[in-house]
Image: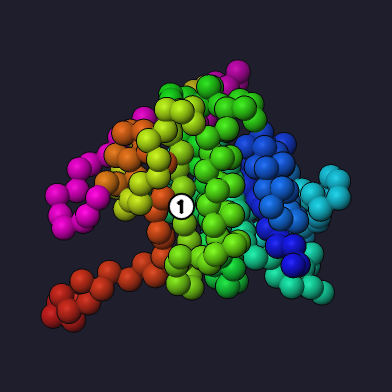
Amino acid sequence: MKRKKILLTNDDGFEAPGLLGLREALSAIADVITVAPTIEKSASSHSLTLTRPLRFVEVEKNFYKLDDGTPTDCVFLALNRLFEDEEKPDLVVSGINRGANMGEDITYSGTVGAAMEGVLQGIPSIAVSQVCRDDCSDIVAKSDYALAIEMTLDISKKILHNSFPLERRKLLNINVPPLKSSECKGIMVTHTGHRVYGNNVEKHLNPRGVEYLWIGLPVIEWYPRYCDIRGMSDFEAVREGYVSLTPIHLDLTSYSDIDRLKEWL
């Protein structure tokens, strides 16, 4: 049987321990081609670089960094350059991100953005994030991603040897609690929660007295959703010790408002 192929990327950069740990684990079940940004590209969303040329830099066999590219650049250019003369990958995996990507934060996420590009290109795709306890200072080595690696490997096996459970233009968003495998309660299928947003901007002065602003690290808080939605939100599942598995689709249309908008016009 022909060996499956996985395209692996992230938004934390090519040296991130989550990426390296996942690359090692996934290599046991497929040929892994890794293309990651040269530097951290967190919160780059689904952005493409259109104002300057980009260059692949080979780190080692089947492992490339994309010079100042975004996660979406990595997927887009890999599929149109590294795979141009052969079959496309069977799966795109984006992660493991250092920090959560839950609720409306997925619209900022470069990790989720890369998975979006994968499904737009017709390839099953998953985004994986490791939730931190506090400020992510506890997530610094490959060993800190052990549960996330284990879960991603299991889900990837299921996709490669069975089928992808979603329709076209839909992806799986996975958030892993900061727990050991023995402490995790399992996987919970979830919906996206409603994030609480505040002013996380810090103001500072440089040595010349000129003001500059730094976007800070927000506390993870969310609103309860009192509506007809079954099960837990991603926030609630992670809080309760479950791995959150959320189906995400790219159609942002608010269908329930179409008739209301027609009346308004």
Which residue is more in the foreground, 100 or 238? 238
Which residue is more in the foreground, 1 or 60? 1
The residue type indicated by label 1 comes to: Asn
The residue depicted at 51 percent of the width and 65 percent of the height is: 164
User: Which residues are drawn in magenta?
Assistant: 206-231
The residue depicted at 33 percent of the width and 40 percent of the height is: 237
Residue 178 part of the magenta segment: no
Q: Is residue 81 above or below residue 224?
A: below
Which SS does the magenta portion mostly show? loop
Residue 246 is left or right of residue 112, and the answer is left
x, y percent for residue 118: 59, 64
The residue depicted at 55 percent of the width and 60 percent of the height is: 159
Q: Is residue 236 visible?
A: yes
Residue 209 part of the magenta segment: yes
Q: Is residue 232 above or below residue 2?
A: above
Using the rendered view, name the quadrant where residue 197 is placed: top left
Residue 165 is left or right of residue 123, and the answer is left
Instruction: Kindly give the residue lying farthest to the top in the view shown.
Output: 207
Q: Is residue 136 above or below residue 58?
A: above
Residue 234 is left or right of residue 171, and the answer is left
The residue depicted at 67 percent of the width and 42 percent of the height is: 25
Which residue is more in the foreground, 12 or 236? 236
Q: Quadrant of the N terminus?
A: bottom right
Q: Is residue 47 visible?
A: no
x, y percent for residue 111: 55, 49
x, y percent for residue 141: 64, 26
